[in-house]
Amino acid sequence: MSGIINDLAIKHGAASVEPELVRRWRDVFARGYESQLIMLAQSGLWVDTIDMATTWSRLVRLHNELVGSLVPLMVLNTYSQG
């Protein structure tokens, strides 16, 4: 499966990085994350995340495309709740 994901990522412009950089990023990202999710779930909230990575030069485009994709979902959700 990771070969398929790797091939797809490269097709869309992904670049490989050093494994140590990935390990350090994951350590920082995961610090406290699980306890925060548990606290939110115990408060009756549903939490989901979208994790993405891009270069600085592609950041604005990624943001605009993401917001453009999510806005219709927000309208549907508002409508379904009356």
Image (tube, rainbow, N blue to C red):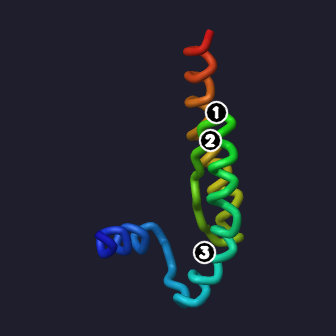
3D distance between C-alphas at marks 3 and 2: 22 Å
Q: Are marks 3 and 2 in contact (CB under 8 Å)?
A: no
Q: From the viewer's perspective, is the residue at label 1 or at label 3 nearer?
A: 1
Name the residue furthest top. Answer: 82
For label 3, count other residues whose C-alpha is less than 10 Å away and answer few (under 14), some (14-19) or many (20+).
Answer: few
Give the amino acid at mark 2. Answer: Ala
3D distance between C-alphas at marks 2 and 1: 5 Å
SS of the residue under disc 2? helix
Please state which of residues 66 and 42 is positioned toward the viewer in this rendering.
42
Please state which of residues 37 and 23 is positioned toward the viewer in this rendering.
37
For label 1, count other residues whose C-alpha is less than 10 Å away and answer few (under 14), some (14-19) or many (20+).
Answer: few
Q: Indicate the position of residue 36 as horizontal and vertical percent values.
A: 69, 53
Q: Which of pointers 1 and 3 lies earlier in the amino acid sequence?
A: 3
Q: Indicate the position of residue 53 as horizontal and vertical percent values.
A: 60, 67
| Residue 59: quarter of image | bottom right
Q: Quadrant of the N terminus?
A: bottom left
Which of the numbered marks, if any, corresponds to residue 44? Answer: 1
Give the amino acid at mark 1. Answer: Gly
Please state which of residues 4 and 82 is positioned toward the viewer in this rendering.
82
Whether residue 57 sits left or right of residue 52 in the image: it is right
Which of the numbered marks, if any, corresponds to residue 41? Answer: 2
Q: Which residue is mark 3?
A: 26
Whether residue 70 sits left or right of residue 2 in the image: it is right
3D distance between C-alphas at marks 1 and 3: 27 Å
Q: Are marks 1 and 3 in contact (CB under 8 Å)?
A: no
For the point 71% across and 57% down, which residue is it?
60
Q: Are marks 2 and 1 in contact (CB under 8 Å)?
A: yes
